[in-house]
Image (cartoon, grey):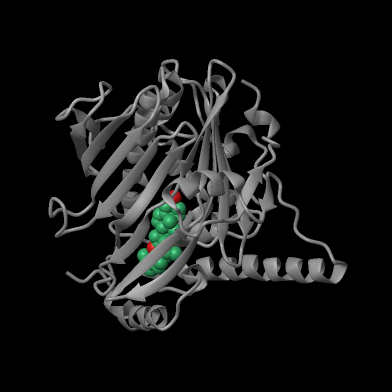
Amino acid sequence: GDAVPPAQRSSWISFLKSIASFSGDLSSMTAPPFILSPVSLTEFPAYWCEHPELFSAISDAPDSERRAIAVLKWFISTLRAQYTSRTETMGSEKKPLNPVLGELFYGHWPDENGRGRLDLLVEQVSHHPPVTAYCMENRSKGLLFCGHNGQKTSFSGGSIIVKQVGHAVLKVKLADGNTEDFLITFPRLRIDGLWYGSPYIELVDTSYIISSTGSVCTIDYKGKGYFSGKSHSFKANLSVSAPMHATYAVEGLWHMQSKVAASSGSALAKGDPFFDATAPQEDVTAVGGEDNGEMGEFETRRLWEKVAKGIREGDFEMASREKTKIENEQRQRRRDEAAAGTKWPLKHFEYMPSDETYEWLGAVVRITPSTEEGYRFVGNWPASMTKD
Ligand code: 0T9
């Protein structure tokens, strides 16, 4: 079926044409109303927090072999929300709001069943091109996960190909006082279904999880017609070197079930279920910054309030008027800064032209590119988030 409303057909086609003839920053292109989402990209890092109990379990693992498995399980558990949730809740992938420089998002997931409280902080660290930086911390468990994400898009065979530019590092504080670092890279996306106005994401290519104790996990993603022939298929090959050498393979569907396909170690047995993304889950509603009455003008839900309301209620005139207001205000700020010779100060991150952890751990798999910029987390958690 065709999901494009008849009155928006021609504007959808010209949108697709401009995508096809242009590669770069899609987020700033104007799209027809039916495809707009009222949610800004600064809220997307919350997908990493959808399974706080699996994140917390990383710190409970007794050795680096079981820790590598726990990290893989947590990583796989986030994919369903990251890549299928808009299609599940809104009927198709939608175009998110394009964050402004300095836009912020805070949230936390309360402590339940001993999992510890999980805090999330997000800052838009670049507007042109869009780059979002984030940090997620479970202080009581000694877990800190920080990363940044931008996108390079191109058009091929009727689909949008999105290379995620950026990476994340998970730091696990161990009982002996040492820290284990995991470099996590992101898969490539193919956005299909564009012609019919019902875009959805397929994951393709490879992503990695590489640890400072020598474990290497290579995750291959395939759509319909590969491996199992089903869409959203993956195969993960994990090799660990401590306490002993062992290899594991996990395969399945990242939005459904996966199982252990091969094992040479004792931590998992061939045939064991690995992760079930369809299993009912405990309530993981985030508590947002709006609850403590200190939401500033740059916090995403306040900044975009009227635009989001317009999109939700079908008042696209108001949405577009309010969006123009925000954009003009931004342009004015940039002009004022240029005139004053100042730069917008980031609140929580510091730009690094190259990230040592990426280079060091990425070298293990001869990662490309061999070097990447990074954003060092400088802290400054809002006072309300460090209370308990
Ligand atoms: C990091 C994620 C990312 C952000 C989104 C490509 C995309 C922007 C980036 C990569 C998250 O951890 C995971 C999920 C979805 C990604 C988005 C899907 C998408 O379509 C947008 C781009 C910018 C568009 O809006 C393209 C135009 C649109 C009409 C297609 C629906």
Seen at 78% across and 61% down, the residue is 343
Displayed quadrant of residue 125: bottom right
Q: Is residue 206 visible?
A: yes
Q: Where is ligand 1, by quadrant?
A: bottom left
Rendered view: 173 above or below 27: above
- The percent position of residue 33, horizontal first and vertical second, equals 40, 70
**Along the horizontal axis of the image, is 19 left or right of 158?**
right
- The percent position of residue 277, horizontal first and vertical second, equals 26, 37
Seen at 54% across and 45% down, the residue is 360
- The percent position of residue 85, horizontal first and vertical second, equals 33, 49
Q: Quadrant of the C terminus?
A: top right
Seen at 37% across and 26% down, the residue is 65
Rendered view: 58 above or below 378: above
- The percent position of residue 351, horizontal first and vertical second, equals 68, 52
Question: Which residue is more in the foreground, 199 or 215?
Answer: 215
Question: Which residue is more in the foreground, 169 or 44?
Answer: 169
Rendered view: 117 above or below 324: above
**Along the horizontal axis of the image, is 81 left or right of 264?**
right
Q: Is residue 313 visible?
A: no
Question: Which residue is more in the foreground, 299 or 374?
Answer: 374
**Along the horizontal axis of the image, is 289 left or right of 341?**
left
Displayed quadrant of residue 162: bottom left
Seen at 17% across and 58% down, the residue is 224
Q: Quadrant of the N terminus?
A: bottom left
How many callouts does the rendering have?
Answer: 0
Question: Which residue is more in the foreground, 189 or 353?
Answer: 353
